[in-house]
């Protein structure tokens, strides 16, 4: 094999590895955190259920959570009707 062929292969491999790291860094810049929702609703109605979220920082910089919004999926009418059907369950 010729030296120039080996040199071209090494330059190509180095460029490919640099491209992988650049794509990874760009992805972390655009999506610095990962949020995984969780829900715990016990079958025993005497225990309270819980809705939570696990937040993972994928960035090298410190990320601060300044606001957290939660949105309901049911209308107020639907929530009230379900609560009237089973009043022991928290609304």
Image (cartoon, rainbow, N blue to C red):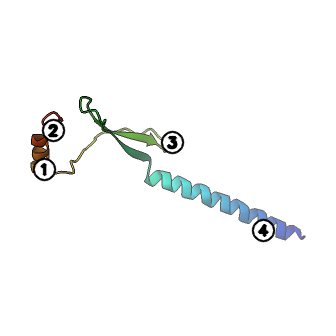
Q: Residue at x 30, y 36 (%)?
A: 43
Q: Distance between the residues labelled 3 and 2?
A: 41 Å
Q: Which mark lies nearer to you, 4 or 2? A: 2
Indicate the position of residue 2 as horizontal and vertical percent values: 89, 70
User: Of the residues under marks 1 and 3, which one precedes in the sequence?
Assistant: 3
User: Of the residues under marks 4 and 2, which one precedes in the sequence?
Assistant: 4
- Residue 90 falls in image quadrant: top left
Q: Residue at x 10, y 46 (%)?
A: 81
Q: Name the residue under label 2.
A: 91
User: Of the residues under marks 3 and 2, which one precedes in the sequence?
Assistant: 3
Left or right of 53 on screen, residue 29: right
Residue found farthest to the top: 46
Q: Which residue is drawn at 49% across and 51% down?
A: 28
Find residue 78 and name its label: 1
Left or right of 30 on screen, residue 14: right
Q: Mark 3 points at which residue?
A: 60
The quadrant of the rendering that contains the N terminus is bottom right
Find residue 46 and name its label: none
Q: Distance between the residues labelled 1 and 4?
A: 67 Å
């Amino acid at each position: 094999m010729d030296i120039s062929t080996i040199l071209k292969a090494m330059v190509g491999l180095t460029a490919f590895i640099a491209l992988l790291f650049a794509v990874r860094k760009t992805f972390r810049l655009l999506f610095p955190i990962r949020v995984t929702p969780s829900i715990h609703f016990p079958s025993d109605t005497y225990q309270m259920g819980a809705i939570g979220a696990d937040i993972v920082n994928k960035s090298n910089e410190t990320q601060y959570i300044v606001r957290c919004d939660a949105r309901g999926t049911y209308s107020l009418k639907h929530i009230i009707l379900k609560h009237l059907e089973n009043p022991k369950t928290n609304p």
